[in-house]
Amino acid sequence: MSNAPAEEIPAEEIDLTEANEVIDKYLKLPGNLMPVLQGIQDAYGYVPKPTIDLVAERLNVYPSQIYGVLTFYAQFHLKPRGRFIIRVCVGTACHVQGAERITETFFGRLGIGHAETTPDLRYTFEKVACLGACGMAPLAMVNDDTFGKMTVQKVDEIIETYNARPMK
Amino acid sequence: MSDNAGIKILICQGTGGISAGAKQVEAEFTRLIAEKGIVAQVGKRCDVVKTGCRGLCANDVLVDVITPELGRVTYDFVVPEDVAAILDQHIVNNEVIEKKKAKAYYNTFVDQQMRVVMTGCGQIDPERIDAFLEEDGFKAIEKCVKEMKPSEVIDEVKKSGLRGRGGGGFPTGMKWSFCAASPGNHKYLICNADEGDPGAFMDRSILEGDPYCVIEGMMIAAYAIGCDAGYVYVRAEYPLAIDRLQKALDTCYEKGYLGKNIQGWGFDFDMRIKKGAGAFVCGEETALMASIEGERGMPRPRPPFPAVKGLWGFPTNINNVETFANVRHIINKGADWYASLGTDTTKGTKIFAVTGKVKHTGLVEVPAGMSVRDVIYSVCGGIANNRKFKAVQAGGPSGGCIPAEVLDTPVDYDSLIKAGAMMGSGGLVVMDETTCMVDVARFFLTFTKMESCGKCVPCRIGLKAMLDILERITEGRGEMADIDTLLEMGATIKKASLCGLGQTAPNPILSTVKYFRHEYEAHIQDKRCPSNSCKELLLWQVVPEKCVKCGACLRACPSNAIKWEKGEVAELIKENCTKCKSCYDACRFMAIE
């Protein structure tokens, strides 16, 4: 969610071709900063530091403004993310149906908290505000797979399933 | 063509349908139909993207069988093993299988609703423009452009009494007239599809189920106001809505329904999608515009109002998805028809997302003015698990809780505000006796605190301070003076905040203190949570008098903390217990506390 603590940015070398392509696509559009950043995130899975410098230079905006946008919106990530993104809905309907124990069980089983990634880059865990499928509450998602009517037992089943999946 | 032409089998493939095995059911139908040589069309009754079809995903897999002889028959809880029987008995022998047919409540659920905005949802294929054109698509805008002056369109909308469905309830026609009156040739129209309210998903369903009706609504508004460019601001969390809408926009451009000189009518309108990036505050008009401009979504003080100086300094009009979706029906069927629906002050229908501890969760569209009780008990079947109704939370984080005493409040803007809640975007979260109201207030405040943009002090610091107090109370460290502090701070934050987020954020606390003060007092004085919900205050034991020895808790416990033998009272072993509350929720007799 929007005011998560500022993340550390690892220094790294990456291929900027895709970032340049994204910028080319939106260069002439008014208000293009967000679509550019969203495109970069789609391409790399997160927004790597070198691309921020590139965007600043090519769109002629201050890096501070870019960081302002990146840290304001919940959707942007400054660090690499796991192969499997586990999202647990903590919307009202899910909360009422016991979403808290689902999140806490995941925390316990994975050893990571909200917006964190396991060191082996297998899982990233996120609490999300509402996935819009309140009829199936409590709800969890792993990448694009939806798991409705979650229970604590199902948490273990999910982790077992995805532990068995290959990383690539 | 054989005699069986015209037979359709529609299988529900929403999120619920698929998790209940709709794919297997469909495969079985396809296999057996080929094997038996029946000519029938197997299709999707609703699919992942057309959620909210008829809203009864709890009964999946739902299968509609349509034959010329028997009409449309709905079966529920269908599994692959049932398929052969349905084909043999229903389709070959023309005999309805009464045992498998959806029971009476299904019809109650469907019949008690009144579908205006959602007529197309789940009925038409949102990816085919022809399907929309067959339903009189774009007839309303054609009528406007050819037969009406822009001012007449505004008058018609004014006369219909349509009010903004995003929550505030500002009269739509009036809003349009402000922007229309602003000087200048270049104006913007924005459709707010941010829908950040946890517990509401009607905007998403409309965009996914019937995107063209929103496009047509925006075209009509653009014509009336004199806008030539429009944005739809959609949350990025709704990838399918974005995908569907983008396809619809592309088709419209291809077929000449958008762009320059639409259909030769001499009317120009351009539209594009703007993806949000996950910030609740962006549902607020001025924050939304800042976000479109590529900045942090921070609200600006008003005036100047967007109608005068909005997006990039041009006059701008913003309406919600559901508002735009209403417009074509008003033009097609007339303002008088629309005004005949609903109550004196709230016209038309309203879509509610009814969720929580209710039997039939889902989207329901009802005429404004139906009582909250009817929505919950008649349409949605009442409370699940034989538990007692406690409250219904209306209006999301900006709304409030309505207790049983005021259940007969009609669902319209003014009555709900009087009851201490608000319409909001139309989320109704039903709570039973296991829901702690202090915890609910804490939940909403956690959300609004997190989503506060931080620009103004009352919201940024005030909400944090209130949340600290609430957390203390739920952990059993509260003091009686805290309640007054909460009320005082709430009133101040409402008055002093810059935008709608802060101005409404204290509502959940104020309404729960108003109606459920005794729960706050129990937490503070007795260090006890009457609903057995706040973890720190739970004793974690089985109440022998209440236990019916059913063993449900044992089956629910993931950590071997329950000892139970058939015919014995269950026992909770504290050393193994992780306090996950699974047993508590599984117990239907409130025997664990």
Image (cartoon, coloured by chain):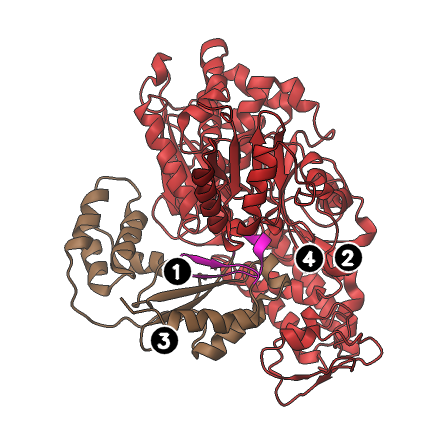
Q: Secondary structure at mark 3?
A: loop
Asked if B494 appears above or below B260 in the picture, the reply is below
Nearer the observer, B324 or A137: A137
- The CA distance from mark 1 to mark 3 is 15 Å
Which amino acid lies under the numbered mark 1 shown in the image of this protein?
Asn
Q: Few, some or many C-alpha atoms within 10 Å of disc 2 (few <14, some 14-19, many ≥20)? A: many
Contact? badges 2 and 4 (CB < 8 Å): no
Q: Chain of mark 1?
A: A
Q: CA distance from mark 2 to mark 3?
A: 41 Å
Vertical relation: A153 (above or below) B460: below
Which circle's residue, 2 or 4, is located before the other in the chain? 4
Residue A68, located in which quarter of the rendered image?
bottom left
Which chain shows up in red?
B
The answer to whether marks 3 and 4 mark residues whose Cβ atoms lie closer than 8 Å is: no
Disc number for residue B389? 2
Q: Secondary structure at mark 4?
A: loop
Given the image, what chain letter belongs to the residue carrying mark 2?
B
Look at label 4 and name its amino acid.
Lys
Element type where label 2 sits in the image: strand
| Chain A: drawing colour | brown
Provide the residue designation for mark 4: B357
Q: Residues within 10 Å of mark 1 (few under 14, many from 20)?
A: few
Q: Give x and y (percent) for residue B118.
A: 57, 33
Bounds of the magenta span?
A130-149
Dots 1, 3 in contact, CB < 8 A: no
Which label is found at residue A143?
1
